[in-house]
Image (cartoon, helix red, strand yellow):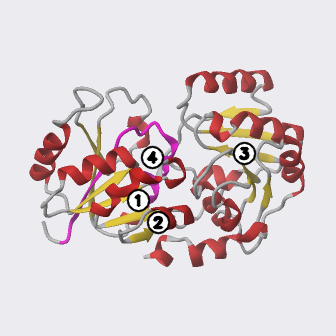
């Protein structure tokens, strides 16, 4: 086996945008070492799963027999014992419960990850059973107690020769009402920008509304790319990232866009303002204010210190 590190990612649904981002970030971080990775999931239908997995990442499905399946931790334990991982990484609270329950007395290390802003505090106790907890936001640091907290970082952007397209807004994230994708599209168009929308359709009725609006705009004004594994080419071509979310933790897309040299316009939710250094590195507007969002899109320009800010404070190398 040598120095090969084995990592099992326990992720319930890779159709969720946050799961995709975490897998991308962790894969990028782990690529710095010799790592064998496998994603373990319990979803039966995941049409977006195959194209989202890097070639170096395997896949195992351990289907649950019912929603509350008391046999699942035992079957997960059997599989883990056979595969012999060094690390079991669990993304979001349900996965953390399964991971901790299946790992009592086990030789592998458990690392959990949680979006604290969407989880009641009383459900966070399970993270005390992990060896470490990856946290993105200050809410995570306050809400998870009694555990070793590790801030998760983002990989460095690759070098690219792509040509940046002026007045092109990138809207990257799941098509969901929480992300306010329609507001981002409308505000960008109102500012005179073309839009590129990329992300999984996790909310079917809302995604249908988004698709209809994009069809009305036509291919000359709007493109929908679906779920993407590698966002860096999109950052390299767009001129501004637009994030109109109504709720967030510490969205990775903000840091990625800064690292790639984009202008950033985002709503004042979660840790967004802090990620933009109090708004110095990008525009921060109230959620739900389409006119303010549109004005900011038209006026905001890339900040020259964005890439250095991310590299020094939020990169994988900086956070270790």
CA distance for labels 4 and 1: 10 Å
| Residue 19 included in the magenta stretch of the image | yes
Q: Residue at (33%, 67%) from the top-left corner?
A: 132
Position of residue 131 in the picture relative to residue 305 (left or right): left
Specify the quadrant of the image occupied by residue 134.
bottom left
Image coordinates of residue 158 in percent, x first then y, are 55, 63
Q: CA distance from mark 2 to mark 1?
A: 9 Å
- Contact? badges 2 and 1 (CB < 8 Å): yes
Disc with the residue nearer the chain's start (3 vs 2): 2
**Mark 1 highlights which residue?**
26
Residue labelled with disc 2? 152
Q: Looking at the image, tell me whether mark 2 or mark 1 is earlier in sequence order.
A: 1
Q: Nearer the viewer, residue 142 or 193?
A: 142
Please report the residue visible at 67 percent of the width from the left and 67 percent of the height from the top: 274
Residue 38 seen from this side: yes
| Residue 67 lies in the magenta stretch | no
**Quadrant location, the N terminus:** bottom left
Which comes sooner in the sequence, label 4 or label 1? 4
Which one is in front in this view, the residue at disc 1 or the one at disc 3? Answer: 3
Residue placed under numbered mark 4 in the picture:
19
Q: Position of residue 5 (x, y in %)?
A: 23, 65
- Could you say whether the residue bearing mark 1 is in a helix, strand or loop? helix
């Amino acid at each position: 086996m040598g120095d090969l590190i084995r990592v099992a990612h326990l992720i319930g649904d890779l159709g969720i945008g946050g799961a995709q981002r975490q897998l991308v970030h962790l894969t990028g971080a782990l690529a710095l070492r010799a790592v064998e990775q496998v994603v373990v999931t319990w979803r039966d239908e995941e049409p977006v799963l195959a194209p989202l997995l890097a070639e170096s990442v395997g896949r195992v499905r351990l289907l649950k027999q019912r929603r509350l399946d008391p046999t699942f931790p035992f079957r997960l334990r059997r599989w883990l014992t056979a595969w012999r991982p060094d690390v079991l990484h669990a993304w979001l609270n349900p996965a953390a419960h399964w991971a901790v329950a299946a790992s009592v007395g086990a030789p592998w290390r458990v690392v959990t990850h949680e979006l604290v802003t969407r989880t009641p505090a009383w459900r966070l106790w399970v993270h005390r059973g992990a060896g470490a907890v990856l946290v993105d936001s200050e809410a995570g640091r306050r809400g998870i107690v009694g555990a070793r907290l590790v801030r998760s970082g983002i990989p460095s952007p690759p070098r690219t020769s792509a040509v940046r397209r002026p007045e092109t807004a990138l809207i990257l994230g799941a098509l969901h009402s929480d992300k306010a994708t329609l507001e981002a599209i409308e505000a960008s168009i109102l500012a005179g920008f073309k839009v590129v929308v990329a992300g999984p359709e996790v909310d079917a009725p809302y995604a249908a509304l988004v698709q209809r609006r994009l069809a009305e705009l036509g291919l000359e004004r709007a493109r929908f790319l679906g779920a993407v594994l590698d966002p860096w080419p999109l950052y390299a071509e767009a001129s501004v990232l637009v994030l109109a979310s109504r709720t967030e933790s510490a969205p990775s897309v903000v840091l990625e866009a800064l690292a790639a040299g984009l202008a950033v316009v985002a709503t004042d939710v979660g840790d967004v303002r802090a990620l933009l250094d109090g708004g110095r590195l990008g525009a921060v507007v109230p959620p739900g204010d389409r006119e303010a969002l549109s004005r900011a899109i038209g006026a905001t320009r890339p900040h020259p210190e964005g890439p250095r800010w991310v590299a020094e404070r939020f990169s994988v190398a900086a956070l270790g």
